[in-house]
Image (spheres, rainbow, N blue to C red):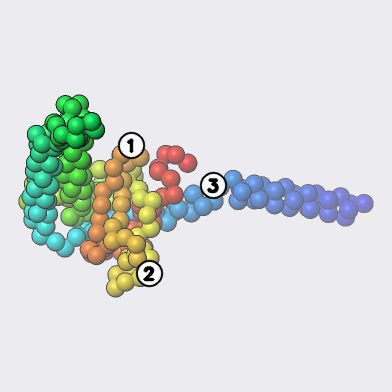
Amino acid sequence: MLGASVKRIFFGQRSLLNRRRHKHQNSGNGPILMDNIQRRRALAQFKDKAEVTVFDRQSSRTHFRWGPWVAGGQMLMWINFADFYWRYSMDKDEETGELHLSPAWKRACTAGIALVAGLAVGGGVLHYISRSVARMQIINGGQVVRLETYKISGCGTRTKVVPISGMFSRDKLYTGEGPNGVSRAKTSQYSIYASRQSSYAYIMSRSGYFRDPRAFDVLFHRAVAPGKR
């Protein structure tokens, strides 16, 4: 009798432990906990260092000096098109066959579309330049990230400092392809957000220098933005 009671107690406790273990594994906290442990280990390498460069485009600070010229040149082209259409757009009279100037509303609509297209293309070029990262450094013992991005003038860079805890990327940097292990067939870019409130990503060139692509993924790769789990 005593042996049977001990046996029931033993197997009952083991069954309870197994159920708790199974619940913990299925709750989704296991992978999150492991990610946090790996992230802390990756950050430990920056603990006693004032600054560490983790990415450098390895391009001159005037790499995009062509940008304003391209934006301005194509804008001028669209302005000329809009002006030409406003002045000379003609319609043919179906009864007489004579040509006459198109109605003002029609000319204004087409000219307006041309101007909007010019602004969109030019703005897109300048926006791409402003979000392109020249250098990324982890500073203050791994607490903060300093980003150097190109100015829209194409000459020089500007600096932005953001907490490392909020930065994330839905892209995987390390692919195992190419000389640095970060090449990707369909794109040469890598995108990263400063925080989950950011509407636009910063852009890094995969052809640049990455200090440790695997550690970079541990630090910044997220399936969802931080705070949304």
- Looking at the image, is mark 3 or mark 2 earlier in the sequence? 3
Q: What residue type is labelled 2?
A: Gly
Q: Which amino acid does label 3 sit on?
A: Asn
- Looking at the image, is mark 1 or mark 3 earlier in the sequence? 3
Separation (CA) of disc 1 from disc 3: 24 Å
- Mark toward the viewer: 1 or 3: 1
Pointer 3: residues within 10 angstroms few (<14), some, or many (20+)?
Answer: few
Look at the picture and state if 209 lies above or below 33.
below
Q: Residue placed farthest to the right in the image? A: 1
**Dot 1: what SS?**
loop
The residue that disc 3 covers is 29
**Dot 3: what SS?**
helix
The residue that disc 2 covers is 176
Separation (CA) of disc 1 from disc 2: 31 Å
In the image, residue 46 lies at what x, y percent?
28, 56
In the image, residue 152 lies at what x, y percent?
12, 46
Q: Residue 197 carries which label?
A: 1
